[in-house]
Amino acid sequence: MSVAMESVAVAHGKLILENPLALLKDQVLGEVILPETDQYDAARAVGFFTVDRRPAVIVRPVTAEDVSTAVLFAQEHDLEIAVRSGGHSLAAHSVVQGAMVIDLSAMKKVKVDPLTQIARVQGGATSGDIVAAAQPLGLALSTGDTRSVGIGGLTTGGGIGLLARKHGLTIDSLVSAEVVLADGRIVRASETEHPDLFWAVRGGGGNFGIVTEFTFRLAQVGMVLGGLLVLPASPKLMREVLDYAYAAPDGLTVIADVMHAPPAPFIPEERIGERVAVLMVTWTGTLEEGLDAVAPLRALAEPVADTIAPIPYENMYLYTDQYSGQHGAAVRMMFADDVTDAMIDDVFEAMGTASSPATMMQFRAMGGAVSRVAEGATAFAHRSQKYFVSIINVWIDPADDPQVHRAWTDALFAKLQPCGRGAYVNFLEAEGETRVQDAYPAETYARLAAVKAIYDPQNVFHFNQNIKPAV
Ligand SMILES: Cc1cc2nc3c(=O)[nH]c(=O)nc-3n(C[C@H](O)[C@H](O)[C@H](O)COP(=O)(O)OP(=O)(O)OC[C@H]3O[C@@H](n4cnc5c(N)ncnc54)[C@H](O)[C@@H]3O)c2cc1C
């Protein structure tokens, strides 16, 4: 191993290492960013302005071998590891104080084979990178609702998005994954190779290794009938929205937010701030059937705005692009077999005292293709739940006191949680071990702990929604 010149100083005739971490520069092809460098502050920033952590070193690998080297180097130097793909972890797990960030953002190639409709996606790509490569071929992957979310975090947690009811979770399209393990080995996981690992990375989070490449089967999705239907909100209207969204044909996926109408080109100025239900509607299928599927929603009330139209699927992301920038957020999430009228009343009462004008109460109807995969087939196991229910309390002024927003969020969640079940690992903040256990049925959790004991017995990958290795 050669010693990098900038890392040594001469004192009393002896070589002294100034920063042993600079040695990593000689061992990887990618960038190594140390605190004294110009890029450091930008490289340690994540999606939330509330997070201000100073890692000892940020590595931007360009190959799976680089990732492997970084993983081994971190262990040699007793450094905790944080893994970063899109940097959107609600728990801020992609940046770690005083340790190593393995930042995959230089590994974002997406290669789509138009004949087989198979995409090979590097672990640092975002949903936006995938849609940019797939849309021109009339293809798509069922990812989340926001362009900048990383495929690394999204997929290892499950991936619930705009096409979920038609094409399932992101993991339901996963054919295989190339994974760098804690001992530095680079393995492929699929139904036939390391099937236990393949099962675990489909919902078990970043616990088992670093995925450097995902292979996905894409769906034929070119144009969709999609957009926003903004309706004046009332408990009665939400009851009807939720009942219909779950019972609708699979081609229709609806994300319904109760919120205050934001300033947007499609919202009449005099209605900004009014309490509304913003339905993010995506239909895949024929236009005629889509218009029929959307009609019952359109009939519910005179809309504040209706942008639903035939559009390229990629354009759906325009409606969430504002969340790609830095913001503050306090999030609580649960699944529910049913959203009761009492829950809806609690939501409406709480929205009257919302701590931020951008607060959203989000409901997603599950069902469809998500529910047709057997519960035990993947580590994501909440497939029979009808609704995804989440308080997404967003604020945009960095001067706001986060405690005010967190207190409001916690108070509402305390009311709702008794009516819900479980949690989605990708919508957890740093909420403690019990909540990580909530994300899995007991049997699934035990199986994940057993797989963890095989692939990461020392819990090297623990800066995540951690599953401890079974003893
Ligand atoms: C604005 C916004 C919108 C969202 N919308 C949706 C949505 O519609 N649907 C949905 O399902 N989720 C959604 N999420 C949640 C999102 O899926 C999670 O926050 C996810 O963890 C983010 O992934 P990331 O790669 O951007 O995050 P990062 O912070 O980069 O990574 C998060 C964690 O994932 C693991 N990880 C990341 N990359 C890899 C990898 N290559 N190999 C192994 N482990 C890895 C690591 O443990 C890492 O700490 C949203 C989040 C935000 C902030």
Image (cartoon, rainbow, N blue to C red):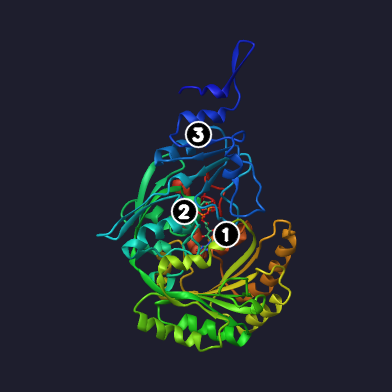
Say left or right for 194 vs 419. Answer: left
Q: CA distance from mark 3 to mark 2?
A: 22 Å
Circle 1 or circle 3, nearest the eye:
3
Residue at (35% x, 77% y) in the render: 285
- Per the model, the C-alpha gap separating discs 1 and 3 is 29 Å
Q: Amino acid at mark 2?
A: Gly
Q: The residue under label 3 is which amino acid type?
A: Phe
Residue tagged 2: 152
Q: Which residue is at a point 48% across and 58% down the rendered structure image?
A: 154
Mark 3 or 2: the one toward you: 2
* Most foreground residue, 175 or 238: 238
Residue marked by disc 1: 436
Q: Quadrant of the N terminus?
A: top left
The answer, for residue 310, to whether it is visible in the render is yes
Report the residue that reaches farthest toward the left: 115
Residue at horizontal 67 percent and vertical 75 percent from the top: 273
Element under label 3? helix
Residue drawn at the location 58% of the way across and 80% of the way down = 339
Asked if ligand 1 lies within 8 A of label 2, the reply is yes
* Rendering coords of residue 48 (x, y %): 62, 55
As displayed, is residue 347 above or below residue 91?
below
Mark 1 or 2 closer to N-term? 2
Mark 1: amino acid: Val
Q: Is mark 3 within 8 Å of ligand 1?
A: no
